[in-house]
Image (cartoon, rainbow, N blue to C red):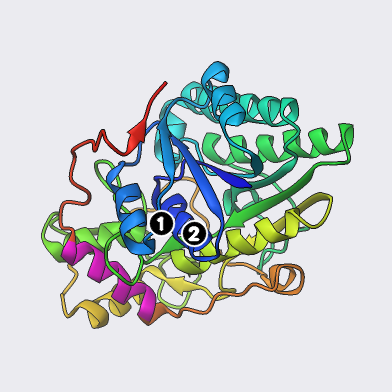
């Protein structure tokens, strides 16, 4: 009985692989390494002491995906794979719609063909309307404001339609807030391509000397210090949430959405201060104008995940910052940009 992980070499995917292996599951990973690196999977094996197979393939290639389903007794799927940069989605929306939607459609068609109906989907808090009241509950109005968020919203709608056509499906939609941190070993963490899109890797790259200063977009929001407030959750807590969701879909039927966050909001300047304390490094920053589309405040109501998944975030802000810094300090240039051909299979 094998769990298929699409996009398993990525930031959240690799940490989820660790937690699944620790929990005793067998896994197989599919990834095309467009925004990840196979070195992360080698380190997952190092951390857990367990082996598994990974395949370098495009999820839109139905023939190759079917070969994996033919080879393994797949019980459930956790679907991370997809383009994920908001700014890039605005400048190249067709690429996002083509990749994120088509890869999911091919995956679900293949699952249906091979009788696999348990799915945990990597969604996002970007599906929520910016006009919604805080905290955001799963029944809050939806209204994504960028192509990336709209692909997540559209996929959620596709998955509801699949269930309505076949009630034997069991699907969990996990709406992440802002994952940060790294594995406590310092061996796996967030390794963005190019300039970081998210706050914490930007801060940590300033701390290590790769970037000169942090750009803070807006200090005139109606918040405690004028900077944007977000709900940050440790990536290991997030990974454990996927294990809990997997157990849920394996024992029930239907489609349910769950927020995965802490339920607390921290401003940009509070994050800078917390990271400075954890790292002992001064983070220079420059105030710039607001970015279009950014909301002042965004944080989760996480009561549903606690009640139905028996999950809640355990790691606090200090631990998030400390683990981020350990990863960055030990890996100033991220993963080595060398493909370990022995560990990655191709068709």
User: Of circles 2 and 1, which is in front?
Assistant: 1
For residue 219, the mark is none
Q: Which residue shows up at 59% across the image and 74% down it?
A: 263
Q: Position of residue 95 (x, y in %)?
A: 47, 23
Label 1 near label 2: C-beta < 8 Å?
A: yes
Viewer-proximal residue, 271 or 204?
204
Please, what secondary structure does the residue beneath circle 1 have?
A: loop
Which numbered disc flags the more N-terminal residue, 2 or 1?
2
For residue 50, the mark is 1
Neighbor class of circle 2 (other Cα within 10 Å; few <14, some 14-19, many 20+) is some
Judged left or right of residue 143, residue 271 is left
For residue 21, the mark is 2
Judged left or right of residue 339, residue 220 is right
Viewer-proximal residue, 204 or 121?
121
Q: Position of residue 69 (x, y in %)?
A: 60, 30
Q: Position of residue 58 (x, y in %)?
A: 46, 25
């Amino acid at each position: 009985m094998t769990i298929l992980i699409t996009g398993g070499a990525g930031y959240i995917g690799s940490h989820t692989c660790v937690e699944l292996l620790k929990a005793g599951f067998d896994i197989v990973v599919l990834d095309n390494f467009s925004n990840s690196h196979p070195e992360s999977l080698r380190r997952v094996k190092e951390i857990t002491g367990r082996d598994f197979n990974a395949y370098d393939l495009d999820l839109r290639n139905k023939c190759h995906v079917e070969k994996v389903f033919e080879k393994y007794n797949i019980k459930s799927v956790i679907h991370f794979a997809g383009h994920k940069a908001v700014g890039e989605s605005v400048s190249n929306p067709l690429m996002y719609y083509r990749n994120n939607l088509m890869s999911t459609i091919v995956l679900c068609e293949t699952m249906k063909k091979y009788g696999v109906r348990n799915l945990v989907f990597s969604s996002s808090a970007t599906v929520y309307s910016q006009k919604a009241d805080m905290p955001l509950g799963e029944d809050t109005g939806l209204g994504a404001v960028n192509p990336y968020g709209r692909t997540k919203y559209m996929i959620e709608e596709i998955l509801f339609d699949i269930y309505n056509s076949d009630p034997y499906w069991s699907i969990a939609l996990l709406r992440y807030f802002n994952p940060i941190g790294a594995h406590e070993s310092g061996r796996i963490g967030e390794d963005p391509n190019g300039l970081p899109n998210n706050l914490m890797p930007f801060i940590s790259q300033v701390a290590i000397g790769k970037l000169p200063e942090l750009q803070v977009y807006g200090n005139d929001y109606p918040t405690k210090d004028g900077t944007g407030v977000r709900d940050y959750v440790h990536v290991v807590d997030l990974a454990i949430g996927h294990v809990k969701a997997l157990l849920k879909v394996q024992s029930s039927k239907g489609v349910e959405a769950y927020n995965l966050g802490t339920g607390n909001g921290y401003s940009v300047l509070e994050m800078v201060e917390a990271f400075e304390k954890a790292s002992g490094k001064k983070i220079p920053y420059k105030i710039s104008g607001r970015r279009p589309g950014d909301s002042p405040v965004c944080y989760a109501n996480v009561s549903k995940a606690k009640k139905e998944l028996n999950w809640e975030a355990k790691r606090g802000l200090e631990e998030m910052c400390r683990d981020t810094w350990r990863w960055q300090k030990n890996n100033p240039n991220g993963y080595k940009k060398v493909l370990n051909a022995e560990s990655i299979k191709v068709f």
